[in-house]
Amino acid sequence: MAEQSTGQALPVAQVREYLTGLQARITQALEQVEGEGGARFLSDTWSKGPGERLQGDGITRIMEGGRVFERAGCGFSHVRGPQLPPSATQHRPELAGAPFEAMGVSLVFHPRNPFVPTVHMNVRMIAAGLGAAGSGAAGSGAAGSGAAGSGAAGSGAAGSGAAGSGAAGQPGNEPTCWFGGGMDLTPVYGFEEDAQHFHRVCRDALAPFGDALYPRFKTWCDEYFCLKHRNEQRGIGGIFFDDFSELGQARSFDMLRSVGDSFLESYLPIVERRQAMDYGQQQVDFQRYRRGRYVEFNLVWDRGTHFGLQSGGRTESILLSMPPHASWSYQREDAPGTPERALLEQFLVRRDWL
């Protein structure tokens, strides 16, 4: 795509270079975890040209059937569209119908061992013009084309809550853009030390930008990743932010990079601790049952998924967040004192982990 300026500051090339590099670093690290003879990522480069609802390009990377990861998707996309879909303007109705540009990386990893938690992360930047098609800057999560999305890998950048504001509008429109993203952990079997480690890394990534950000973004994450139809948290949370530019463009982008750069530190030590734990069919059955909840959230509540589908995004990329196997059980009740019951009572609750 042609290089442009993100309004007042960041050139598109700078943001894009960071995001594609982040995708490469993360996927390489997972292949190292898989080890010799393990699965490798399939890289699917795609583009959308004139005449399609979105224009742009991206890279979808997917690993399936691995030794450690049953399914792992990590997508980058950079797209433009002539009109923001409803899911992206619910908090900013003045942007309804505005053109936009979005860029981001999003991932969801589903491990094979039920004792290793599922994880989601995305970082995105979005811009929308109040009067120009193809707006101007870098956008947030891939606008549905396959990269960002608040809860689904590749689900669609802006989906997480707001869309960017006027980055490349017609002359006279004030150019702006903003950022969103975060990461959250979804265990099948809960471990206090894993939850504490994950939240500690999240806190430390935000600390250079203000002590108030972690508690604020943690609360936002708890509120967002909730299956409201079941009154149940999706996991143990993490951090989530959207519509963020209050530090200025350059400093806000620095914060975004700090979040993205901290992901491997937040997750890989947990994988190393849990991947060799013994498990049986009982644990696999419970894993698939909990994955059903993951599917419910992504399809019913995730604004990133909705954004991607509404904006004409790439369906295969949008849905790469889905687990390979999931199941449902009518009114399941696990016995008191079991690890399965402990997950619901002790971990899928809003609490302070630090």
Image (spheres, grey):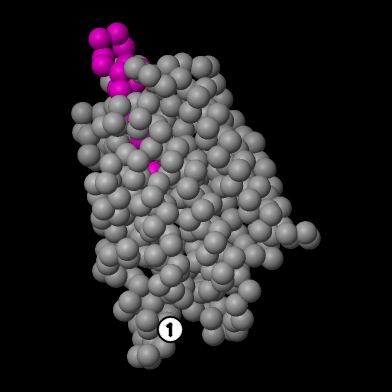
Using the image as rendered, state which of residue 26 and residue 125 is in the foreground. Answer: 26
Magenta-tinted stretch: 166-181
Would you say residue 51 is visible in this rendering? no
Looking at the rendered structure, the secondary structure element under dot 1 is helix
Mark 1 lies on residue? 339
Decide whether residue 134 is among the magenta residues.
Answer: no
Residue 334: percent from the left, percent from the top?
A: 39, 87
Using the image as rendered, state which of residue 197 and residue 128 is in the foreground. Answer: 197
Would you say residue 57 is visible in this rendering? yes
Q: Residue furthest top?
A: 171
Query: Residue 53, relative to residue 4: is it above or below?
Result: below
Q: Quadrant of residue 344?
A: bottom left
Magenta stretch prevailing secondary structure: loop
Query: Residue 282, relative to residue 228: is it above or below?
Result: below
Query: Residue 58, relative to residue 241: is it above or below?
Result: above
The answer to whether residue 306 is left or right of residue 316 is left
Other-residue count near label 1 (Cα within 10 Å), few / some / many at <14 / 14–19 / ≥20: some
